Image: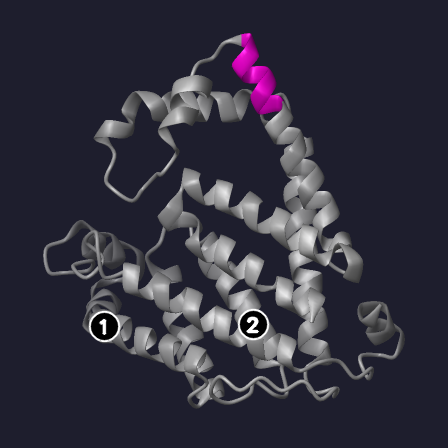
Amino acid sequence: MWFFDALASGFRHPTDPGAVQWFRILFGAVLTARFALAFGQGGWDRLAPGSLSLHLAAQRYGPARARLLATVYRPALVLRTIAAAALAAGLAPRLALLVVLAGAAMELLYLRSPNAVRYTLLTGACLLVAGNLGHGFNIEHTPSTANTWARCLLVLMTTNIYWNSAWQKLHSDQFRTGLYLAQWIHAYAQVKDQLPRGQHAVPAPVCRHLGNLTERDVQLWRLAAAAVIAAELALPAVLLIPAAVPYAVAGGITMHAAFSLLKPRQLITFSGLTTGTYVAFVL
């Protein structure tokens, strides 16, 4: 397998540079969507004069720094969105990548739970160390060592994400027994009509047939929880087996699509970037 050959050679084993170039396109597309969505649902008016977010920023950083943040906020929203689109299109990709990462890092200053931002910065850092990001939508396939290190980093990062997630789920009695998922769907079924549009997208049949807290429902969600844990443990290894790649990719995309139904806006970055890293495994 190319991955183990790369490790054994100290990352001097030639690999297909197109894998990282494909991920650059996918990374730019996902971040373009994320940044575009940030304009809506009050995002454009964040840090506006008299807003709670500006008041909290002033308490955290002081009035002068909060005013500076408020001044650059809207121009940064526009600039980073343009840069993300340019990155996907391969226009000055390294400069565009730096602007995108700076624009994403800005969110660390005001988001309460910036896990998606951290993941964005980590995957973006993998692109930063790539020697050949390509230009435009042209994908190169001549083997070289230019992107071997970056490609291995993407594989290792995705493996760590999946295995760490599986480990936490295995050690959560509430998730492992199916109770967490059963309670989540039950609560969602009760309040879904009061939630903002686009926040959740659980299909109505799921709420109708699996939205109660009966023993049958909990048992079914227990099976779903076990399937998720098994998939997260197996996917990184299976993605490296050429004969099993189509099944692994289909399974991974299906799993992330199901995750995204629970929280479409919140998980667009995680699901988009994680499934995007599959190209680093298989090309």
Give the number of callouts: 2
User: For mark 1, what is the residue?
Assistant: 68
Left or right of 75 in this view: 81 = right
Q: Is residue 184 above or below residue 70?
A: above
Which image quadrant for residue 186?
Answer: top left
Q: CA distance from mark 2 to mark 1?
A: 34 Å
The answer to whether residue 85 is left or right of residue 238 is: left
**Quadrant position of residue 22:** bottom right
Q: Nearer the viewer, residue 183 or 246?
A: 246
Measuring from the top left, give residue 116's x and y in whole percent.
Answer: 46, 56
Q: Secondary structure at mark 2?
A: helix
Neighbour class for label 2 at 10 Å: few (<14), some, many (≥20)?
Answer: many
For residue 102, which numbered disc appears in the image? none
The spot of residue 123 in percent (x, y) is: 56, 67
Location of mark 2 (residue): 23
Query: In this view of the protein, can residue 33 be seen by the observer?
Result: yes
Work out whether mark 2 precedes mark 1 in sequence or the reverse, and give the earlier one: 2
Q: Nearer the viewer, residue 96 or 26?
A: 26
What residue do we see at 37% from left, 72% from top? Answer: 103
Nearest the viewer among 155 and 245 is 245
Quadrant of the rendering where the C terminus is positioned: bottom right
Residue 218 shown in magenta: yes
- For the stretch drawn in magenta, what is the main secondary structure? helix
Residue drawn 36% across and 28% down? 204
Residue range highlighted in magenta:
215-222
What amino acid is found at the position of numbered circle 1 in the picture?
Leu
| Image point (63%, 87%), residue name | 140
Report the residue that reaches farthest toward the top. 215
Do callouts 2 and 1 mark residues in contact (Cβ within 8 Å)?
no
Residue at x-position 71% and y-position 80%: 16
> Can residue 194 be found in the magenta stretch?
no
